[in-house]
Amino acid sequence: MANLPSSSLILLGLLALSFSLVLAVDQDFCVADPNAQVLVDGLVCKDPKLVEAQDFFFSGLDIAGNTSNQVGSKVTPVFAAQLPGLNTLGISMARLDYAPWGINPPHAHPRATEVFTVLEGQLEVGFVTSNPENRFIRKTLQKGDVFVFPIGLIHYEKNVGEGYAVAIAALSSQNPGAITIANAVFGSKPSMPSDVLAKAFQVDNGLVNYLQSKF
Ligand SMILES: *[C@@H]1O[C@H](CO)[C@@H](O)[C@H](O)[C@H]1NC(C)=O
């Protein structure tokens, strides 16, 4: 080792690191350990010998979410945080409930494509393609219909039926993330400068301040 140039040592170090990363995910599962000191996707796993059926289990998706809120919808996630056995497996799901005329406001998932299935009711769904086209794609879905929201694109759903609506979403990440546009833009903590938003939205500062007060 002593006579190897330092660049070789760095290379060896990187190789060792990549081997340990491969070892961490090249196995049947990596149940997220809530007691781990450091929890990075796939890098800290529960000892496989201590894993139980409960780690791969979630109960309660038969229960409707409470839609008594400003937007009239509720997402019940079943991500790695709720079902530790999903960790590193690149898949998760959610139940979505909509009050009559409720919406799931425009949002994007930075790490997942979403396959969306209507179980009850009638929902209008839409997404917008990326710059520069920003094409708006929209469809009304009935019970049993399936629609896909490609990864990272801004999308929404709106209940256009008479009663409550229910959907199930499947997502291509154990931790898909969500950026709700209005909350991220007008409700950031601390606030984005109102002059930046005023120029971006081509409105006056007063309207920006009003919108910021709402989120
Ligand atoms: C639903 O949420 C509202 C608003 O937070 C609350 O007042 C109400 O008690 C909740 N209903 C149920 C059944 O939990």
Image: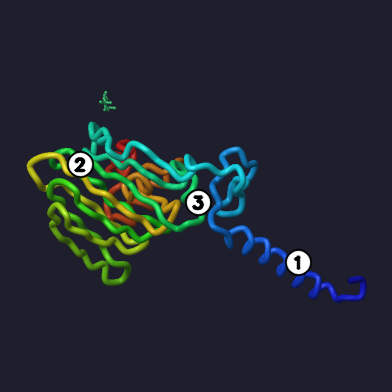
Residue furthest out toward the left? 162
Q: Mark 1 = which residue?
A: 13
Pick whichever of labels 2 and 1 is earlier in the sequence: 1
- Disc 3 to disc 2, how far (Cα)? 28 Å
Who is closer to the viewer here, 153 or 45? Answer: 45
Which kind of residue does numbered mark 1 sit on? Gly
Which kind of residue does numbered mark 3 sit on? Asn
Query: Does 87 sit above or below residue 57?
Result: below
Image position, residue 69 (x, y; %): 25, 33
Tell me the quadrant of the picture where the N terminus can be found.
Answer: bottom right
Pick whichever of labels 3 and 2 is earlier in the sequence: 3
The residue at 38%/47% (across/down) is 184
Q: Mark 3 = which residue?
A: 87
Q: Mark 2 = which residue?
A: 98
> Pointer 1: residues within 10 angstroms few (<14), some, or many (20+)?
few
- Disc 2 to disc 1, how far (Cα)? 52 Å
| Label 3: element kind | loop
The residue at 47%/40% (across/down) is 54
- Disc 1 to disc 3, how far (Cα)? 26 Å
Image position, residue 33 (x, y; %): 57, 43
- Left or right side of 98 for 15: right
Image position, residue 118 (x, y; %): 19, 51
| Label 1: element kind | helix
Image position, residue 192 (x, y; %): 42, 47
- Left or right side of 161 for 167: right
